[in-house]
Every structure is written in structure tokens, then in C-alpha cells.
Image (tube, rainbow, N blue to C red):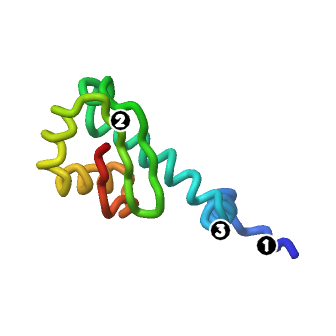
């Protein structure tokens, strides 16, 4: 049965309830993580990024440059922290560069 809201519920509260429940939150998290990768890493690294996927709390990033992949692997912890800061929540706990 549908949840009933009183006359005093704001639209924002209703949307948070709808997004927070079910698969919609997971889908939005995937999009948010991909957008955060592109905004945090900048245009230079985005040129070499072929795919960004969030699976659970692991962010999989496919890069077309093996040299760039090696360089970024040294700063994994910092990249994870910057992405989580950009999303304002702890979405990413592990980063896999492919």
C-alpha cells in the first residue's frame, strides 16, 4: 500500500523517501560517481577514460593509457577521498583501475 503524507510534508521530503527506497538510489549513485570522477579528475584524464562503473562500493575505471593508469594507482587513496568529498557521501571505498 502506498505511503500517505499529510498536508505538511514538503515535496523534498517526499522525493527523499522515494529516492532513498529501492533501486533508484543505487542507479543515482552510479551516475553521481561517474560525474564525480569526470569533475574531480579534469579534462586531461577524462580524455583517456573509456568507462566508469560503480559496483557496490567499488569504482571501476577503464583507462586507455597504461602509463596514466600506473601514475594514478599511486594516488588511489587521495582519489577516493576526492570523489567521496565531491559526492558528499562515502560512495567509493575501493578504486580499481583497468
Is the C-beta separation of discs 2 and 3 under 8 Å?
A: no
Viewer-proximal residue among 64 and 59: 64
Where is residue 46? Give x, y as percent.
Answer: 32, 29
> Looking at the image, which residue is at 26% across and 54% down?
80
Q: Which residue is mark 1?
A: 6
Residue positioned 42% across, 41% down in the render: 52
Q: Position of residue 55 (x, y in %)?
A: 47, 57
Q: Nearer the viewer, mark 2 or mark 3?
A: 2
Give the quarter of the image for residue 81.
Answer: bottom left
User: Of marks 3 and 1, which one's residue comes earlier in the chain?
Assistant: 1
Question: Cα distance, mark 2 to mark 1?
Answer: 40 Å
User: In the picture provided, is 24 more to the left or to the right than 55?
Assistant: right
Q: Nearer the viewer, residue 42 or 15?
A: 42
User: What's the mark number on residue 21?
Assistant: 3
Circle 3 or circle 1, nearest the eye: 3
- Image side of residue 72 versus residue 35, left or right: left
- What is the spatial separation of the Cα atoms under label 3 and label 1, in whole angstroms? 19 Å
* In this picture, residue 9 sits left or right of residue 89: right
In the image, farthest residue toward the right: 1
Q: Residues within 10 Å of mark 1 (few under 14, many from 20)?
A: few
Q: Quadrant of residue 43?
A: top left
Residue positioned 22% across, 49% down in the render: 79
> Where residue 38 is drawn, which disc sits there?
2
Relative height, residue 92 to residue 48 (above, below): below
In contact (CB < 8 Å): disc 3 and disc 1? no
Q: Crowding at label 3, few (<14), some or many (≥20) Cα neighbours within 10 Å?
A: few
Q: Could you tell which of marks 2 and 3 lies nearer the N-terminus? A: 3
Task: Kindly check if marks 2 and 1 are in contact, taking CB atoms under 8 A apart as contact.
Answer: no
Counting residues from the N terminus, which is met first, the one under dot 2 or under dot 1? Answer: 1
Amino acid at each position: 500500500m502506498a505511503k500517505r503524507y499529510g498536508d505538511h510534508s514538503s515535496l523534498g521530503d517526499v522525493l527523499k523517501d522515494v529516492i532513498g527506497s529501492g533501486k533508484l538510489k543505487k542507479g543515482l549513485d552510479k551516475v553521481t560517481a561517474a560525474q564525480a570522477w569526470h569533475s574531480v579528475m579534469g579534462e586531461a584524464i577524462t580524455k583517456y577514460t573509456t568507462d566508469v562503473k560503480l559496483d557496490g562500493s567499488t569504482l571501476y575505471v577503464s583507462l586507455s593509457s597504461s602509463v596514466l593508469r600506473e601514475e594514478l594507482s599511486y594516488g588511489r587513496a587521495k582519489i577516493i577521498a576526492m570523489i567521496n568529498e565531491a559526492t558528499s557521501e562515502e560512495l567509493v571505498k575501493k578504486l580499481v583501475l583497468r
